Structures are given as structure tokens and as C-alpha cells.
Image (cartoon, rainbow, N blue to C red):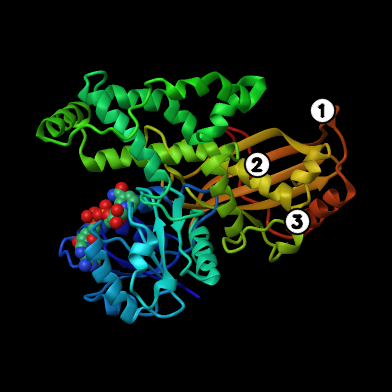
């Protein structure tokens, strides 16, 4: 059954939550008194629709319904999750919680996006305190997976479990803090970096651009893939973390950090920082910067996914959880009807698959077909465990026909036929569609290989039996148009 999220406050963050829920199939009901809120959420949604669906390798569910409501009471009707993202002022938030207390159903979780307040400050005095948790996201909420979940003794284990389950279900990562603390974990950390950066600019050591370069050409790339401690463990060399601490521990008493000492906030500091920031980035509009940011985030997370690491591994787990709903089988038993071509890919063309012509670049057709071949291999039993035990299929020959173009954000599906599956040979015919439009065909000959000798060898009997079963069932279908064609051959 479609679930419903109520979004109270639809600015930068509320809009991002709305997009995250909507694109994961939830109905979304918004309350925001600003007459401009519709336009603002529309802009966030445009960015989200452009970048999120292609982030993973499995299609998301159909979008939910977005609706606007004139009051909080109406917006929270039937909501399973309420996300409060009003401006960061405690008295305003408490006023909103006063209203939520009267109208939110008992089974719902109320999450606050607050960057700084503790959950006890939001729960204070409200009869439904058990329902209120901090669910602190990161901008852009539709792409960044982290949500800091902060709770108190007032929250029941059921509410906490439900909060984590829902956050995981929309492709995010709930980091449940052991205790509440002002500004949670990640913002404490960012604040320390921010303080040092302000000093470095104020003291004329580096400009805003040079500081950004110090991050993005150096430690920022490391942090995105291993964080802080694992990075330093590697930096300690073979002797590991203890050696690293011994080497750099004494620095803790050196004047490397200004700790809690902050520069005075005044017009001069604002002019200095804002002026340098304009010089650095003023040639781009905010919309352009958002899109560059999103393209980069998608590219980085997809690269991490290829190594099943960090934020990429998280996305892969979300993809795996979605396979059944997306119509992708993992075994013969899960194939609906073996007499028909098997669906082996159901995804959206990601942002990083397009080229200077503005459409999916040729090498990605092979990438997509290779993903389909991998899926078929898993279905017949040539899965990770089988491969680890020394058997696999290697591609010997490929012929791709590019019949129609497709763009980033478009859905693509591949349906696969087994033309021959006997002995060492696996002859596959993939057809790639967007809806009913045929985009490409891929004909592939693969050979089963013994990974120890790297030479062709017969597959295990159960793998061959599954392949033969598919080949025999598919033989009853009319021969595919274009099968066996060479380049230049006429139809
Ligand atoms: N901007 C960030 O990077 C970021 C990141 C994580 C969390 N947060 C937190 O998210 C919350 C919202 O921040 P933002 O950056 O989206 O601010 P924002 O100013 O972009 O959005 C706030 C929205 O709330 C609306 N609003 C005001 N009063 C309201 C009311 N009574 N009921 C419903 N809506 C109301 C405003 O019209 C506006 O659209 C804050 O608590 C902030 O700390 C911000």
C-alpha cells in the first residue's frame, strides 16, 4: 500500500525530503505558508527527477502523488511520517509541534530536520513526545544518504525501529546517535572545519577558493570514500592505527588548531568571505551550481558503487532490496515465465552515461548489456559463490546494433533470450527497450571458463541444465530480427 509523508515546511530541506519520498513511491502532502513554496519545491523536484532515478542500477517505484494543503491539520491526515523542516527557531518549531500534537495520528513518526536542537527541546511539554525524533538530513536530501537519528528516553523502541526502517526504505542511512548533543555529530565536525576556515580567510592565509581546493584536491576525496579513521589507519602504513596515533599524537598539543576560539562575526568578515566567494563562483547561477554538484555526486557515488564501498555500497543494498518489485529475478524459480524473454535490466539512464551529443554514449549500451548478462548468469546459478569456486563465463564475441537514441533520466529495460546453451557455450540475444521503443540489440557469445586454468571448460551440471531449459523454452519463439547479422549485411 502506498505510504504517505507530510512535509511541514517546504524550503531547501523540506523540498528535498518531499522529492526523496515522492521518487521512492510515497504520496507527499505539503504545508508551507509561503506563496512561493510551490515554485521552490518544483525547482528541487526538477533537480531530483534529473539525478536520483539513475543513481542506482534498479528502477525506483512509480512516483507517488504530490498535494498541497492549507493547514497542518489537513497536511498530516493519514501520514505515516511527518517531517518538520521549518526555519531553525525554537519558538517557531515548538509552535508547530503544538499543532502536530493535536492532529498527527498515533502510529506516525514525526522527524525534525533541525541542524542544532536536541530532541528533548522539541519534545518538551508535548503529550506525543514519544513520536518525535530528530531526523537530520544533508543537502541535497534527495541524493545524500545520511540521516542522523537522535532520540531520548521518551521515544519507544517501536518508534525508533520504525524511523530506521522508513529511512532505510527510501534509500537513506539512519545513523542513530548514542546520546543527544547540540548539533548532533556531523554538524559538530563541520563546525570545527568551518571555524578553522574562517580563521584562515580572516588571517589572510588562504582565499575561499584556495581552501576549497585544499579540500577537493586532497582530503575531501579521501573522506568521501573512507571517512577519517579508516583513511588514517591506511596512512599509518603496515603498523596501522597505533603507529599513526604515535606519530601524530604529539601534534595535539601544538598550535595546529584554534579549537573553540572563533573570529568575531562582523561586517568586515562578511564582506571578506562574501567577496571572495563571489570572485570564486559568481560566474555560475545557484541553479547551475546545484546541477554541477548533483552530476558530481552521482558520478562519485556510482564510482563507489562499482567497488561496493561507502555510499555506493549503501545504494547497492537499496538496489538489491528493490529487485523483486522491479521485476528482476535472481534465480530460475523467480523467473515468471521461462517461455518468454527474461527481463534482465530495469533501470534509468544515469547522468554519467551521456556524452557530448546529449544521449547515452555507445559504450554504455555494452555496459547495460553486460549488466543483463550478469543478471542472466546469476539466474542460471553462475552467482558470486559459483564464481568464487572457480567457474565463470567470459565473453568471446559481441555485436551491438544501435537503433534509437535514449537520454539521461529515461527508463530502459532489457529482455534476454538464450539462443544456445549447451556445453561451454552461452549464446545470448538482448533487446533493449524504453517503453515499447526498441533501442538496441546485443548478441553475445560467451564461453564457460575454469578460472584456475583460464581455459574454457564445461559448466557445473545445474548451470548447464538451467541454461538448456531456457534455450529450449525460447526456441519456440520466432527468430529475433537481426540475429547473426554482421556489420554491413542488409536486413
Ligand atoms: N540548509 C541546510 O543545509 C540544512 C541541512 C540540514 C538541516 N537543515 C534544517 O532544516 C530546517 C529548514 O531549513 P531550510 O534550509 O530548508 O530553510 P528554508 O528557509 O529554505 O525553508 C524553511 C521553510 O519553512 C517554511 N515555513 C516557515 N514557517 C512555517 C510554518 N509555521 N509552517 C510550515 N512551514 C513554515 C518557509 O516558508 C520555508 O519554505 C532547519 O531546521 C535547518 O536547521 C538545514
Task: Identify residue for label 3.
Answer: 475
Query: Is 191 on the left-hand or right-hand side of 403?
Result: left
Query: Is 412 on the left-hand or right-hand side of 335?
Result: left
Nearer-N-terminus badge (2/3):
2
Task: Identify residue for label 2.
Answer: 443
Nearer-N-terminus badge (1/3):
1
Q: Is 94 above or below relative to 419?
A: below
Question: What residue lies at 28% left-to-right and 79% top-to-bottom?
Answer: 73
Task: Identify residue for label 1.
Answer: 454
Nearer-N-terminus badge (2/1):
2
Give percent across and percent down for residue 308.
60, 40
Tell me where residue 232 sits by quadrant.
top right
Q: Nearer the viewer, mark 2 or mark 3?
A: 2
Ligand 1 within 8 Å, label 2 CB: no
Few, some or many residues within 10 Å of mark 3 (<14, 14–19, 20+): some
State the separation of the CA atoms marked 2 and 1: 23 Å
Q: Quadrant of ligand 1?
A: bottom left
Amino acid at each position: 500500500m502506498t505510504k504517505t509523508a507530510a512535509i511541514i515546511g517546504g524550503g531547501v530541506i523540506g523540498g528535498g525530503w518531499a522529492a526523496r519520498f515522492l521518487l521512492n513511491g510515497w504520496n507527499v502532502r505539503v504545508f508551507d505558508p509561503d506563496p512561493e513554496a510551490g515554485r521552490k519545491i518544483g525547482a528541487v523536484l526538477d533537480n531530483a527527477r534529473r539525478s536520483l532515478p539513475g543513481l542506482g542500477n534498479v528502477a525506483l517505484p512509480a512516483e507517488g502523488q504530490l498535494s498541497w494543503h492549507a493547514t497542518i491539520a489537513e497536511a498530516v491526515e493519514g501520514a505515516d511520517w511527518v517531517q518538520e523542516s521549518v526555519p531553525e527557531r525554537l519558538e517557531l518549531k515548538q509552535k508547530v509541534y503544538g499543532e502536530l500534537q493535536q492532529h498527527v495520528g498515533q502510529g506516525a513518526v514525526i522527524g525534525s530536520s533541525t541542524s542544532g536542537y536536541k530532541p528533548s527541546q522539541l519534545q518538551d511539554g508535548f503529550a506525543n513526545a514519544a513520536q518525535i525524533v530528530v531526523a537530520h538530513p544533508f543537502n541535497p536530501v534527495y541524493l545524500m544518504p545520511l540521516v542522523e537519528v537522535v532520540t531520548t528516553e521518551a521515544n519507544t523502541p517501536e518508534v525508533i525501529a520504525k524511523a530506521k526502517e522508513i529511512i532505510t526504505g527510501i534509500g537513506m542511512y539512519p545513523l542513530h546517535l548514542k546520546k543527544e548533543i547540540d548539533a548532533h555529530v556531523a554538524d559538530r565536525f563541520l563546525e570545527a572545519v568551518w571555524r578553522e576556515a574562517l580563521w584562515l580567510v580572516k588571517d589572510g592565509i588562504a582565499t575561499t577558493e584556495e581552501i576549497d581546493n585544499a579540500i577537493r584536491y586532497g582530503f575531501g576525496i579521501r573522506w568521501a570514500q573512507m571517512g577519517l579513521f579508516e583513511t588514517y589507519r591506511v596512512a599509518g602504513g603496515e603498523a596501522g592505527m597505533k603507529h599513526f596515533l604515535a606519530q601524530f599524537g604529539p601534534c595535539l598539543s601544538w598550535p595546529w588548531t584554534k579549537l573553540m576560539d572563533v573570529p568575531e562575526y562582523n561586517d568586515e568578515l562578511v564582506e571578506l568571505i562574501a567577496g571572495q566567494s563571489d570572485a570564486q563562483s559568481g560566474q555560475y547561477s545557484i541553479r547551475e551550481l546545484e546541477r554541477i554538484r548533483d552530476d558530481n555526486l552521482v558520478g562519485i557515488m556510482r564510482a563507489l558503487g562499482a567497488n561496493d564501498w561507502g555510499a555506493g555500497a549503501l545504494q547497492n543494498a537499496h538496489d538489491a532490496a528493490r529487485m523483486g518489485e522491479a521485476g528482476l529475478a535472481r534465480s530460475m524459480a523467480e523467473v515468471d515465465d521461462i517461455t518468454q524473454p527474461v527481463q534482465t535490466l530495469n533501470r534509468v539512464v544515469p547522468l554519467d552515461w551521456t556524452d557530448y551529443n546529449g544521449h547515452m554514449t555507445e559504450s554504455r549500451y555494452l555496459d547495460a548489456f553486460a549488466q543483463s548478462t550478469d543478471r542472466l548468469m546469476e539466474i542460471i546459478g553462475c552467482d558470486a559463490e559459483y564464481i568464487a569456486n572457480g567457474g565463470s563465463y567470459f565473453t568471446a564475441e559481441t555485436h551491438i546494433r544501435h537503433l534509437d537514441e535514449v537520454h539521461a533520466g529515461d527508463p530502459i529495460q532489457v529482455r534476454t533470450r538464450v539462443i544456445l546453451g549447451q556445453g561451454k557455450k552461452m549464446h545470448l540475444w538482448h533487446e533493449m527497450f524504453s517503453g515499447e521503443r526498441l533501442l538496441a540489440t546485443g548478441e553475445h557469445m560467451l564461453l564457460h571458463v575454469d578460472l584456475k586454468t583460464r581455459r574454457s571448460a564445461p559448466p557445473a551440471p545445474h548451470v548447464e541444465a538451467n541454461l538448456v531449459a531456457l534455450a529450449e523454452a525460447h526456441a519456440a519463439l520466432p527468430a529475433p530480427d537481426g540475429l547473426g547479422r554482421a556489420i554491413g549485411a542488409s536486413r
